[in-house]
Amino acid sequence: MGYDIPAIVAETGAILLGSYIAVDGYYPRRRIRIVTHIHEDHTRGLAQSIRESDFIAATPLTLDLLEALGKRVPPAKKLEMPYGVRVRIEDDIVELRKANHIPGAAEVIVELRNGLQVGYTGDFKLPGTEILKGLDVLVIDATYGLEEHIRPWQDEMEYILSDIVREGLIHGPVHLYAYNGKVEEVMLILRRFDIDAPFIVSRRVYNTTKVLCKHGYCINDVYIARSKAAEEAQQYGYYVQFHHYSSWWSRRRQYRGTHILLTGWELREPYRQISPNEWIVSFSDHADFRQLVNYVEEAKPRLLIVDAYRGGRSAYYFASYVSKRLGIEALAMP
Ligand SMILES: [Zn+2]
């Protein structure tokens, strides 16, 4: 496709699909900025996009979450795109599809005027993400693009994590350490597995749970840390408190109870107990290497572009693996 590749990853981290659309990064003179989900590495340059673009497009849930996080999009620039609804932008037709990553996350497909179809997965894991099949160009996220990046236990982690939390609650409070964005998903999982202990969270996480509830993902018994309601809920020592990932190193010794660090980079075992009350649990919102290969094999794009802005070294390796082993033309960008 030479120099006229209709989908690229720009130096700014923006995924450019056709001539009008920039996804997940700022790029000059793009009429539409699409936000696939609210994670920081997908919302960079949003303020500049808001100033310069005609519309900021995302799922209704993602637009509400941006608002809750203080990234305000003026109402006149909001373009709500529920999954599966086709929207015409100039001569292109754009559609979002559901990605299993965090609530509200989406993939993007654009049908260009010349008939070519291009798309971007955003961040995803399998199952639960629709595979974008038969595109001319597919841009894929490959955070875990090296062959050793496998978590054979990934499908069972929801059960395993719930069991470790349930066991911890027998002895006292449980403290979970995870990145923002992962916390909400973990709360939903624990409630689904019948963990009924009160959840203590930061104000920021509390605000996002209110938005999630408005969109059908309600989580009960959530309290803001150090509030009066939280202190009451905590008095019997039966609660789960969520902390930012970074405070695992600095703060965990301050609290009594069981401490659990959630990380996608635990690739040796599903979980490790590092002291009588400290656990490291392998938990990721991203496809591992096997899932990436499965996705590409099923999607069979004419050209695969691997996002190296977010994937780094993994992206270059994954692109060469796909061209050599799967016989699909592939390259990493930028
Ligand atoms: Zn993400």
Image (spheres, helix red, strand yellow):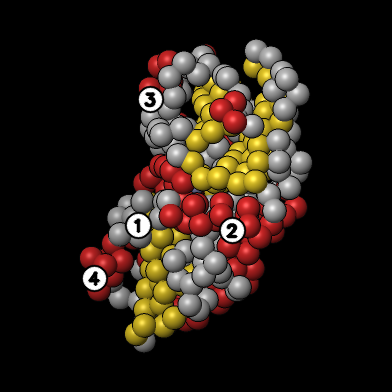
Give x and y (percent) for residue 278: 37, 79
Q: Residues within 10 Å of mark 4 (few under 14, many from 20)?
A: few
- Mark 2 Cβ inside 8 Å of ligand 1: no
The residue to which callout 1 is attached is 244
Q: Nearer the viewer, mark 3 or mark 2?
A: 2
Q: Nearer the viewer, mark 2 or mark 1?
A: 2
The residue to which callout 2 is attached is 321
At label 1, which amino acid type do we have? His
At label 2, which amino acid type do we have? Tyr
In this picture, residue 332 sits left or right of residue 330: left
The residue to which callout 3 is attached is 47
* Residue 240 visible: no
Whole-Å distance between the Cαs marked 3 and 2?
Answer: 37 Å
- Which numbered disc, 2 or 4, marks the residue that appears first in the sequence? 4
Q: Which mark is residue 254?
A: 4
User: Does the CB distance between marks 2 and 1 fall below 8 Å?
Assistant: no
Q: Nearer the viewer, mark 4 or mark 1?
A: 1
Give x and y (percent) for residue 96: 66, 34
Q: Residues within 10 Å of mark 3 (few under 14, many from 20)?
A: few
Residue under the image location 52 percent in, 76 percent down: 270
Q: Secondary structure at mark 4?
A: helix
- Which numbered disc, 2 or 1, marks the residue that appears first in the sequence? 1
User: Extreme front residue here?
Assistant: 2
Residue under the image location 70 percent in, 35 percent down: 136
Q: Nearer the viewer, mark 3 or mark 4?
A: 3
- Which numbered disc, 3 or 1, marks the residue that appears first in the sequence? 3
Q: Secondary structure at mark 2?
A: helix
Give x and y (percent) for residue 157: 58, 70
